Image: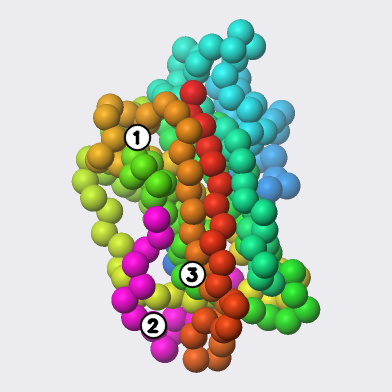
């Protein structure tokens, strides 16, 4: 479920890729090629607690749930939809698999402009799954770099997150990509901490004209499923 559209910002809402990343918080343009620990891994591909970082695998060698020392389950991307029939191609990957007392699980969402021209897409936050809640209402994805009301290790929100309802748009140059790191939190509706099971996230991509209105056949949904175990 993505943020509700109430209106369109006509001035200042058309953001460049860099401007949107700054709006969403630090870490929104994380470089997947670095190994200095900024993406949740150290130079040896570990996330610091002996677990592989960003490889999309979960569990330990015996097939049991999270090893001792983690604060909750690990996340695995188990399925993604086919790319929408639009000039943008979204993708998602795991950056930090396991929840610990220091951080919740983390994903990286990338939206690539595959066309030879600059495109404008909306809603600017939802296209990178910022503030998007899963179909069950038990999990939500929040931009990395902000502090949210949640108990460390549990990562269940203790208060609601206020999200403005303006409709933001973002421009992506030809061949360029928009990237955002998002952390996984349990909502107040969840029982206990991060729930175990399979969950689906979905959002809508709209390609917009110069008046920030969707063009004909310029809208499509895309999503992915994760498991926590």
**Quarter location, residue 187:** top left
The residue carrying mark 2 is: 8
Q: Residue at x 73, y 81 (%)?
A: 117
Please tell me which of labels 3 and 1 falls first in the chain.
Answer: 3
Q: Residue furthest bottom?
A: 211
User: In the image, residue 121 lies at what x, y percent?
Assistant: 55, 74
Residue 103 highlighted magenta (yes or no)? no
Q: Residue furthest top?
A: 62
Q: Residue at x 33, y 44 (%)?
A: 137
* Residue 20 visible (yes or no): no
User: In the image, residue 172 lies at what x, y percent?
Assistant: 64, 74
The residue carrying mark 1 is: 155
Q: Nearer the viewer, mark 3 or mark 1?
A: 3
Give the Cα separation between the discs numbered 3 and 1. Answer: 25 Å
Please tell me which of labels 2 and 1 falls first in the chain.
Answer: 2
Residue 36's label in the rendered image is: none
Identify the magenta region.
Answer: 1-21
Give the Cα separation between the discs numbered 3 and 2. Answer: 11 Å
Q: Is residue 198 above or below residue 174?
A: above
Name the side, left or right, on which 213 lies relative to 62: left
* Residue 190 visible (yes or no): yes
User: In the image, residue 35 lies at what x, y percent?
Assistant: 69, 40
| Residue in front for this viewpoint, 223 or 152 | 223
Q: Kindly state the secondary structure of the residue where label 2 is placed.
A: strand
The residue carrying mark 3 is: 124
């Amino acid at each position: 479920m993505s943020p509700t559209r109430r209106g369109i910002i006509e001035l200042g809402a058309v953001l460049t890729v860099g401007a949107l990343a700054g709006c969403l918080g630090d870490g929104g343009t994380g470089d997947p090629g670095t190994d200095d620990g900024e993406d949740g891994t150290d130079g040896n591909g570990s996330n610091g607690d002996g677990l592989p970082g960003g490889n999309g695998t979960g569990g330990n060698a015996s097939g049991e749930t999270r090893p001792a020392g983690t604060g909750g389950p690990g996340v695995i991307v188990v399925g993604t939809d086919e790319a929408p029939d639009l000039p943008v191609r979204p993708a998602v990957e795991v950056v930090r698999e396991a929840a610990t007392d220091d951080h919740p699980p983390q994903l990286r969402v990338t939206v690539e402009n595959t066309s030879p021209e600059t495109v404008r897409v909306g809603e600017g936050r939802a296209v990178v799954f910022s503030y998007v809640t899963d179909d069950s209402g038990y999990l939500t994805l929040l931009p990395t770099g902000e502090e949210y009301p949640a108990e460390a290790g549990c990562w269940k929100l203790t208060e609601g997150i206020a999200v403005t309802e303006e409709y933001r748009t973002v421009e992506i140059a030809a061949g360029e990509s928009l990237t955002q790191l998002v952390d996984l939190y349990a909502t107040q509706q969840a029982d206990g901490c991060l729930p175990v099971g399979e969950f689906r996230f979905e959002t809508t991509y709209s390609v917009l004209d110069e008046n920030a209105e969707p063009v004909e056949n310029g809208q499509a949904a895309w999503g992915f499923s994760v498991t926590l175990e």
